[in-house]
Image: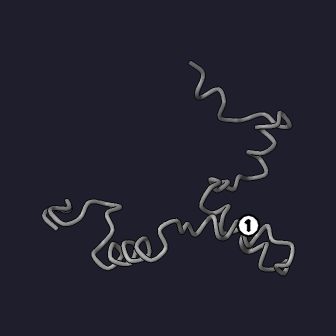
């Protein structure tokens, strides 16, 4: 790196040659394949064991729902009006 800055190469998020080749081959051999759709199909099949159904739902959720950040008990109390925020007067505009 030149002075801590990235110069040249792929931009962030651009797949490398191997990943691109795998995706292209998958699209050629299975044009309408979508991994999340397949997981949803498996998760909603009553014949699928419950443990596998739960795992499918967890995997789908990880790709579709933002993760919730952990908060402290005090932050919870402040957000729900159960405690005063000692820092609130610092941010009065």
- Seen at 77% across and 79% down, the residue is 52
The quadrant of the image that shows the C terminus is: top right
The colour scheme applied to this rendered structure is: one colour
Callout 1 crowding tier (Cα within 10 Å): few <14, some 14–19, many ≥20: some
- Seen at 82% across and 79% down, the residue is 48
The quadrant of the image that shows the N terminus is: bottom left
- Seen at 36% across and 72% down, the residue is 24
Residue corresponding to mark 1: 57
Q: Residue 67 versus residue 10: which sits nearer the camera?
A: 10
In which quarter of the view is residue 76 placed? top right
Q: Is residue 26 left or right of residue 93?
A: left
In which quarter of the view is residue 80 placed? top right
- Seen at 71% across and 52% down, the residue is 71
Q: Residue 91 versus residue 27: which sits nearer the camera?
A: 27
Q: Position of residue 86 (x, y in %)?
A: 70, 35
Q: Position of residue 10 (x, y in %)?
A: 23, 64
Q: Is mark 1 on a helix, strand or loop?
A: helix
Q: Position of residue 44 (x, y in %)?
A: 79, 67
Q: Residue 38 versus residue 76: which sits nearer the camera?
A: 38
Q: Residue 9 versus residue 34: which sits nearer the camera?
A: 34
């Amino acid at each position: 790196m030149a002075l801590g800055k990235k110069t040249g190469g792929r931009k962030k998020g651009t797949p490398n040659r191997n990943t691109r080749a795998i995706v292209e081959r998958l699209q050629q051999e299975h044009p309408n394949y979508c991994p999340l759709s397949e997981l949803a199909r498996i998760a909603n099949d009553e014949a699928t064991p419950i443990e596998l159904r739960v795992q499918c739902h967890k995997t789908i959720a990880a790709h579709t729902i933002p993760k919730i950040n952990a908060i402290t008990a005090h932050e919870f109390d402040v957000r729900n009006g159960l405690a005063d925020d000692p820092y609130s007067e610092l941010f009065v505009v």
